Amino acid sequence: MGPPLTVSASATEVVAFRDLDVDHDEELVGRFHHDILAVSFAPDELEDVATLARGLRGKGDLDVLASVALDGNDAVLGGVVGEVYVRGSVLLLAYLAVRPDLRGRGIGTVLMERVAPLWYARPAVRLAVAEVHDPRAWSQVAGDDPARRLRLYERLGARLLAVPFVQPTVGAGRARVPGFLLVAFHVDPNIEVKLDGGTAVSSDIVGAFVRQYFGKAESVTAPYDAQLTELLGRISEHPAIPLLPVSEYDRIPLLA
């Protein structure tokens, strides 16, 4: 169940965490999906609850991790979901969400502070990334401000990978979602390189992750469609992808 709970003064609603990849509580997974994820993400951005539950039981294509924060009445306050792409040693922080009426109280922060030392220490994780809405393309997302979320990620130590991004199709009847940025929460020192006075990540590592991510989500293989070809071309056009302060997202060119 992880280390003992410590919470900041701004997250005093949280009294317990539950790790859903360890504690296979189908009812709790259902409440997390319905009460938190479904009201925080558009349908095209969200895997269905059956896919999430199957992954948490170890029955999917990836190692899926999830932790939720609960109050004293066992209500779900928020949660975080990770997907481990073992072949590329990449952890995708697929979803981080807090109940809409409780946003801004530090719950997302304590969730990330709890899972980060556990998830990033896994031998299969050399890079941890997340997709985040680009404020230039999105003014509001399910009542949330993309610029506010970027500020949260920056406080959590995230850096921006200098490439645009598009989320692949996450299920039948869904569509790709353009207008994303890709941020790095954790970079193993062994894969971080110096570049023009700053730091960067090998393009090969990021490109391999993107191909595996789209392959898992959409069952696509080369030759790719024009949009994915452009994305992979942006990634591979230089040997390494710079890591930038999250606040400098306007330096990232948009995909066509």
Image: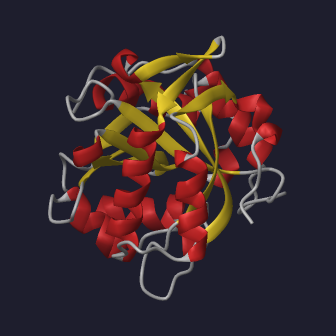
Residue 162 percent across, percent down from the top left: 65, 38
Residue 209 percent across, percent down from the top left: 38, 50
Residue 86 percent across, percent down from the top left: 23, 45
State the residue at coordinates (76%, 38%): 249
Q: Is residue 66 left or right of residue 238?
A: left
State the residue at coordinates (42%, 86%): 172
Q: Is residue 143 left or right of residue 106?
A: right
Q: Quadrant of residue 192?
A: top left
Q: Is residue 89 left or right of residue 192?
A: left
Tell me if residue 98 can be seen: no
Instruction: Depth check: give the residue in front, 108 or 60.
Output: 60
Residue 136 percent across, percent down from the top left: 84, 53
State the residue at coordinates (66%, 65%): 178
State the residue at coordinates (65%, 44%): 102
Against 254, is 86 above or below? Answer: above
In this picture the colour scheme is secondary structure
Against 132, is 198 above or below? Answer: above
The image quadrant where one finds the N terminus is top left
The image quadrant where one finds the C terminus is bottom right
Q: How many marks?
A: 0
